[in-house]
Image (cartoon, rainbow, N blue to C red):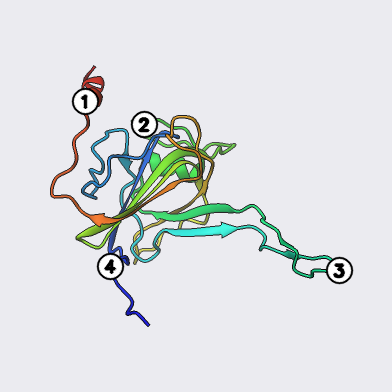
Amino acid sequence: MANSSSTEVIAPATGYIYVAPPNTPAPLWPFIPNHDGPVEPVWKSIGNTSLENGVELSMDGDDPETLGSWQDPALITTNPSKTYALTMNLEDITIETLNLYYGGKVLDTAEVFVIPTNPTPAERALFIAGSDGSQMVGFHYPRVSIIGSDSITLDPAAITEVPVTATILSAGSGAGFTGMGQVFKKTDIPATNPTLPPALMSSKKA
């Protein structure tokens, strides 16, 4: 039996989460993962997230079921639909994180956040970069619906966490592809961030 290889595994000791308007295409890949993030200014870091409670991808839906006939007990297998969601525990208490938790639409320049009477989940594009220090992987979800998923605990002995769940939706027009998302496989972290093509650079200056 061939020896197993560790070349494709990664232990993401650090990670960064970026948000953008829904259906924003993935940023130039790879980039240097940090709070500054991708070179496209449309992608903004969500800030600090929990070290103890990492990002968890969950899947909900019925299991496949085997159906048969009298002649063939295992004739077909059903293919039930699945719903995917990400659970994240945000630690920066900002207008943006409060918008995501409470389902508000307060401008990020506001000094006071007003909790809405009727919360509306926030739609965003989401990009997650996980790094082991020398290499990184990336997950791009062009359209997710985010809302608070658990209680906020003010613990004097711990950093306050704002737990939210992002339900992954189908990509809309403008995302550059059809589907639920993209996974960028492990690659070396570049020495410098990539640069935008001249056409995009000039359009951003206009």
Kind of element beneath mark 1: helix
Q: In which quadrant is the C terminus drawn? A: top left
- Marks 1/4: CA–CA distance: 36 Å
- The first of marks 4 and 2 along the sequence is 4
Left or right of 61 in this view: 163: left
Badge nearest the viewer, 4 or 2: 4
Residue tagged 3: 70
In the displayed structure, 39 sits above or below 133; it is above
Q: Residue furthest right?
A: 70
Kind of element beneath mark 4: loop
Q: Residue at x 83, y 65 (%)?
A: 69
Residue tagged 4: 7
Sort mark 2 into few (<14), some (14-19) or many (20+) by Cα contacts within 10 Å.
few
- The first of marks 1 and 2 along the sequence is 2
Residue tagged 2: 110
**Which one is nearer the viewer's eye here, 76 or 83?**
76
**Which one is nearer the viewer's eye here, 179 or 56?**
179
Left or right of 143 in this view: 25: left
- The first of marks 1 and 4 along the sequence is 4
Name the mark on residue 160: none
Badge nearest the viewer, 1 or 3: 3
